[in-house]
């Protein structure tokens, strides 16, 4: 983990004087620092409704999601080494009312708004698509953490792949097409 000035934050992990409880504290501190920015990025999507292409609007979101998950997962691994630590984390999340829906809701609202504008296919489920986008970001970060960057596509390539394969935008009409 790095501080904003770029210097590494010393952390001994579970093999040194650090404890699982300290790892949870560190993880929660990182979340407290990073999660508000991540949620702001998601909330700001609403300003893009009706502007640009939907896929182009989502590309930086997917890339930011991969970056966010890569950073927080590296701190999460040592934090969840025992059931009591996991329970403590769950209680902290419940107390703050921050959970997976805090990320899903702004993406869902954006996709639903674009769908009302006709810019997202009527066959798309905004909630499921929001979850899939986030899951794709999480998955890339997870594999990058475990196998390294040499064995996965770049973050930019993955972001493009995630957004493209959601197939959100209605097919382009050709001059001879009749309206649906």
Image (spheres, rainbow, N blue to C red):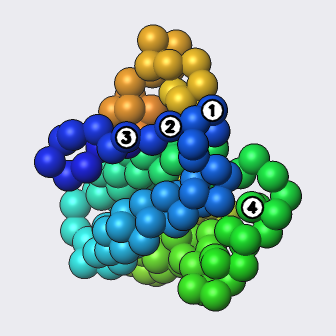
Of the numbered discs in the image, which one, if any, rests on residue 174? none
User: Which residue is the site of mark 3?
Assistant: 10
Q: Earlier in the sequence, mark 4 or mark 2?
A: 2
Badges 3 and 2: C-beta atoms under 8 Å apart? Answer: yes
Q: Quadrant of the C terminus?
A: bottom right
Q: Secondary structure at mark 4?
A: helix
Give the mark nearer the N terminus: 4 vs 1.
1
Give residue 85's mark: 4
The residue that disc 1 covers is 15
Read off the residue under disc 2: 12
* Residue appearing at x 43%, y 46% in the figure: 71
Q: Could you say which quadrant of the image residue 16 lies in?
A: top right
Q: Name the element at disc 1.
A: helix
Q: What crowding class fits label 4: few (fewer than 14 Cα within 10 Å), some (14-19), or many (20 or more)?
A: some
Residue lying at the far front in this picture: please name it: 17
Q: In the shown orientation, is residue 3 left or right of residue 103?
A: left
Q: CA distance from mark 4 to mark 3?
A: 21 Å
């Amino acid at each position: 983990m790095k501080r904003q000035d770029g210097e590494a934050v010393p952390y001994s992990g579970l093999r040194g004087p650090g404890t699982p409880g300290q790892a949870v504290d560190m993880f929660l501190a990182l979340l407290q620092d990073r999660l508000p920015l991540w949620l702001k990025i998601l909330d700001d999507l609403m300003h893009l409704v009706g502007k640009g292409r939907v896929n182009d609007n989502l590309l930086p979101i997917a890339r930011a999601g991969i970056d966010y998950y890569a950073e927080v997962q590296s701190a999460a691994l040592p934090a969840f080494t025992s059931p009591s630590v996991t329970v403590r984390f769950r209680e902290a999340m419940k107390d703050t009312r921050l959970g997976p829906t805090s990320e899903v809701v702004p993406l869902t609202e954006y996709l639903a708004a674009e769908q009302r504008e006709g810019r997202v296919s009527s066959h798309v489920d905004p909630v499921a698509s929001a979850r899939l986008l986030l899951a794709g970001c999480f998955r890339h970060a997870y594999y990058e953490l475990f196998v390294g960057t040499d064995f996965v596509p770049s973050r930019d390539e993955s972001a493009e792949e995630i957004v493209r394969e959601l197939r959100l935008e209605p097919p382009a009409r050709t001059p001879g097409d009749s309206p649906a």
